[in-house]
């Protein structure tokens, strides 16, 4: 991109007698980052010009000239042939100034009945509305990958954990579907956020509206807004939508960080439950044996910056008096970085999950250790008439015996079992198997393979 530093006429020279201090010019400029809004700025300006022509403030030929000029500017920017100037502060003034340069005096009429305050509030909403769509499609891609792997691994046994200690057997398919539930809630949060941000601030002008006979509904329809902001003061100052979006993004990243943490743990030699494909790992410059899970590690790390952006935006808006304040220019970088981080993290996960290699034997062997069917034994005793608390005590003693003797529950003889409880009979061994345990949890939300397959089907229906 090209920056011109020579002095350029600012739109407020009428009131000023001295030029802007050179450092202040650079300090207050936002063009280096808000140029990313150019398409939305042009879209908003075209709708504004059409609305002005519709109500007779501009003539049709004037409007046509403005629209054509703006369309050409859009192409110039796309081709990277546009000269951005810091002296012109932001994306809005850069484009407007170029318009006048191109089409002459008519260009100066575009800003009639408008302010950069309602202009920028409109631009960010248009931008975020599109970005939410892109993020939602990456999310859907990741959810689809989870559904596919969950279906494939519906019968894959693994230990389920609480406190990161072996708790009860589960299936890998069921575990994957826990992640998809989190992500489905994230998708709903984004959808909800999009609904609320789809309201048009344009027409609020600087803060109090405008004396021209504008037709806000007409402009809103052109821009695809579902409603128009009710109150002009609120319209130019509100950044709730950016905070809501970043909050939804922070929760989503929190989910991805949990997901990452498990992938990292599970790909270690100590767990060895999964292997990430080489395409998503890197080696070490010193240790030849290393294959590091960089992608999930980076996503886990990037979660922190999104939390930071949420705190930045909340703090930015705290105690701000109505209506627009220049503080609000600081909303963009945290918002843009949140969008980039979220989109990138989802994309890399959606690409990586289908390549997961599952070490089924290792998972099953790990589920076999750690007395993961102890609860099944207690439930068995309950079915034989023992009260649950007594059953818990009996099984606890049997586990203690196994720990002292270095064996698993299924290695105990029937005679020994009967010393712990005479209600135990030789059908107990069936109960102690992993397959018996998971198949028994055969209800909606349970881990039985049948239920996992049914849940995958429902998940696909929700996509
Ligand atoms: N660059 C400004 C922003 O991002 C645009 C609005 C400026 N308005 C003003 N009155 N200085 O918020």
Image (spheres, rainbow, N blue to C red):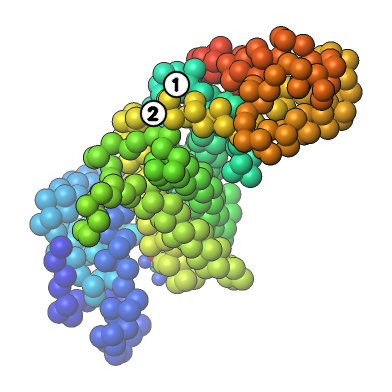
Mark 1 Cα within 10 Å, few/some/many (few <14, many 20+)? many
Location of residue 119 by image quarter? bottom left
Front residue (pair 385, 241): 385
Helix, strand or loop at disc 2? strand
Mark 2 Cα within 10 Å, few/some/many (few <14, many 20+)? some
Front residue (pair 238, 258): 258
Task: Spot the residue most to the bottom.
Answer: 18
Give above or below for 233 relative to 54: below
Looking at the rendering, the quadrant in which ligand 1 lies is: bottom left
Residue at (82% x, 23% y) in the render: 419
Front residue (pair 37, 74): 37
Residue 192 position within the rendered picture, expressed as x and y whole percent measured from the top left: 55, 38
From the image, which quarter does the N terminus lie in?
A: bottom left
The reply to whether dot 1 and dot 2 touch (C-beta < 8 Å) is: yes
Front residue (pair 60, 231): 231
Q: CA distance from mark 1 to mark 2?
A: 8 Å
Q: Is residue 187 found left or right of 45 in the rendered image?
A: right
Residue 202 position within the rendered picture, expressed as x and y whole percent measured from the top left: 44, 52
Location of residue 413 by image quarter? top right
Check residue 153 in the rendering and tell me which mark sits there, or answer none.
1
Can the viewer see residue 346 in this picture?
yes
Helix, strand or loop at disc 1? loop
Give above or below for 419 relative to 29: above
Residue at (68% x, 39% y) in the render: 404
Check residue 358 in the rendering and tell me which mark sits there, or answer none.
2
Residue at (32% x, 83% y) in the render: 24
């Amino acid at each position: 991109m090209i920056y011109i530093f020579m002095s350029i006429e600012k739109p407020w020279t009428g009131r000023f007698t001295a030029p802007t201090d050179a450092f202040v010019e650079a300090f207050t400029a936002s063009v280096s980052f808000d140029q990313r809004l150019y398409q939305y700025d042009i879209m908003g300006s075209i709708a504004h010009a059409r609305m002005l022509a519709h109500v007779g403030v501009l003539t049709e030929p004037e409007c046509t000239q403005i629209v054509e000029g703006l369309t050409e500017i859009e192409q110039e920017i796309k081709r990277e042939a546009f000269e951005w100037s810091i002296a012109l502060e932001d994306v809005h003034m850069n484009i407007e100034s170029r318009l006048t340069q191109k089409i002459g005096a008519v260009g100066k009429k575009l800003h009639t009945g408008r302010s950069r305050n309602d202009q920028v509030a409109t631009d960010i909403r248009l931008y975020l509305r599109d970005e939410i769509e892109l993020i939602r499609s990456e999310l859907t891609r990741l959810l689809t990958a989870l559904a596919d792997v969950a279906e494939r691994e519906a019968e894959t046994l693994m230990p389920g954990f609480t406190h990161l200690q072996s708790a009860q057997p589960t299936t890998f398919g069921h575990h994957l579907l826990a992640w998809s539930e989190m992500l489905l809630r994230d998708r709903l949060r984004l959808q909800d956020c999009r609904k609320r941000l789809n309201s048009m601030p344009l027409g609020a002008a600087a803060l109090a509206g405008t004396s021209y006979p504008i037709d806000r509904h007409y402009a809103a329809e052109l821009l695809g807004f579902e409603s128009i902001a009710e109150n002009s003061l609120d319209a130019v100052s509100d950044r709730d939508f950016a905070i809501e979006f970043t909050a939804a993004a922070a929760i989503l990243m929190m989910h991805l960080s949990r997901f990452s943490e498990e992938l990292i743990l599970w790909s270690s030699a100590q767990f060895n439950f999964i292997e990430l494909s080489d395409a998503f790992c890197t080696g070490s410059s010193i240790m030849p044996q290393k294959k590091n899970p960089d992608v999930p590690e980076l996503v886990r790390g990037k979660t922190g910056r999104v939390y930071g952006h949420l705190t930045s935006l909340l703090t930015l808006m705290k105690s701000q008096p109505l209506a627009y304040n220049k503080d609000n220019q600081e909303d963009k970088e945290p918002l843009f970085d949140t969008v980039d981080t979220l989109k990138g993290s989802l994309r890399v996960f959606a690409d990586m999950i289908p390549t997961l290699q599952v070490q089924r034997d290792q998972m099953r062997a790990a589920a076999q250790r750690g007395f993961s069917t102890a609860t099944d034994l207690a439930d068995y005793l309950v079915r034989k008439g023992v009260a649950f608390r007594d059953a818990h005590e009996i099984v606890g003693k049997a586990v203690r015996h196994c720990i002292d003797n270095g064996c698993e529950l299924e290695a105990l003889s029937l005679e020994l079992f009967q010393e712990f409880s005479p209600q135990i009979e030789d059908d107990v061994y069936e109960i102690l198997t992993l397959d018996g345990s998971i198949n028994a949890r055969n209800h909606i939300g349970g881990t039985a393979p049948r239920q996992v397959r049914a849940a995958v089907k429902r998940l696909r229906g929700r996509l």
